[in-house]
Amino acid sequence: MSSGRPACASQSAEAPRRSQVLDCVRGVHAMARILIVEDERNLSNVIRDDLVEAGHRVLQAYDGPSALEVAAREAPDAVILDLMLPGLDGLEVCRRLRQRSAVPVLILTARAEEVDRVLGLELGADDYLTKPFSIRELRARVGALLRRVELTTRAVLSPDDEALIVGELRLDPGACEAIVHGRALELTPKEFALLHLLVRHPGRVFNRDYLLDHIWGSDVVVGDRTVDTHVYRLRQRLGSDSPIARRIVAVRGLGYRFERE
């Protein structure tokens, strides 16, 4: 599972976590460390009990600042995050988590407005669930998140893939590294997977539906703007005016491609 710092590419900080990820991918253990951030303690305890019964280790926080402290200290494998929190609201917690971690985030919200769900997804959340919800559905959503992380990790950390060198960019799937001019980029697993897919197939146009299905999975509700937002962030991390960033181009009405030299 992924967490730690936001980069795919920190050798010292990520080495222990990468080992845990590979253990999970190989089926060595199925238990995940899940952080519940919910100020309604009764609901938090109900969720906790169900996840513990499913074999997971559960951490709990009841406000925004505590959530960030626990996440930094414990490096959870997934976060269940309510939007309405004291101290810092869930959207701000999600934004700050994404600054330093690629941990999958499932948003819980009682809000009906679509804008809140879209904001959460654009800030980096992976899925959402609207209250009231069934515990069975929540468990299924968490399981789907963890499976997607494992599938992404298999693709990203595959030892069979050789490093790609394109201009000033070097992509090493085995080490989960993206390096430009000797500088390791801080990419989330989805950003790395997106960049690796485009660079590995120069000239090929990938439509948004394909990218959503291949990188996010078909069982999560996201929209075209999710792809566009990740492409924008990827260009920013590469350096918006860099030659590599300029080669990631939008194809009107279709999707994106990485241009050939």
Image (tube, rainbow, N blue to C red):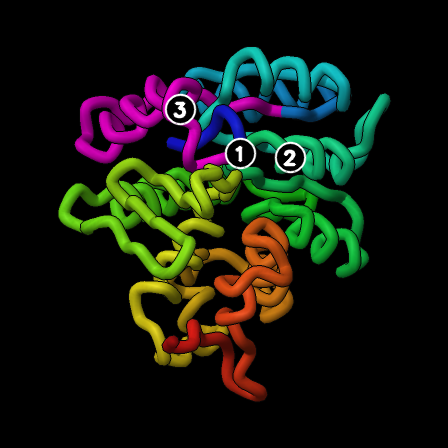
| Residue furthest bottom as drawn | 253
Q: How far from the left and from the top, in percent, is residue 22?
A: 25, 30
Q: Earlier in the sequence, mark 3 or mark 1?
A: 1
Q: How far from the left and from the top, in percent, is residue 227?
A: 56, 64
Q: In which quarter of the image is the N terminus?
A: top left
Q: Which amino acid does label 2 sit on?
A: Gln
Q: Is residue 68 visible?
A: yes
Q: Is residue 50 visible?
A: no
Q: Mark 3 points at which residue?
A: 14
Residue located 51% across and 78% down the image: 255
Picture layout, residue 147 above or below residue 232: above
Residue located 31% across and 29% down the image: 21
Locate residue 40 relative to residue 133 in the image: left or right.
right
Q: What residue type is labelled 3?
A: Glu
Q: Do the residues labelled 3 and 1 touch (CB within 8 Å)?
A: no
Pick whichever, 56 or 169, lies toward us: 169
Q: Which of marks 3 and 2 is nearer the N terminus?
A: 3
Q: How would you rate the neighbour count of disc 2 (Cα within 10 Å): few for under 14, some for 14-19, many for 20 or more?
A: some
Q: How far from the left and from the top, in percent, is residue 138?
A: 52, 39
Q: Do the residues labelled 3 and 2 touch (CB within 8 Å)?
A: no
Q: Do the residues labelled 2 and 1 touch (CB within 8 Å)?
A: yes
Q: What element carries label 1?
A: loop
Cα–Cα span, label 3 and label 1: 10 Å
Q: Name the residue under label 2.
A: 99
Cα–Cα span, label 3 and label 2: 16 Å
Q: Earlier in the sequence, mark 2 or mark 1?
A: 1
Which label is found at residue 6? 1
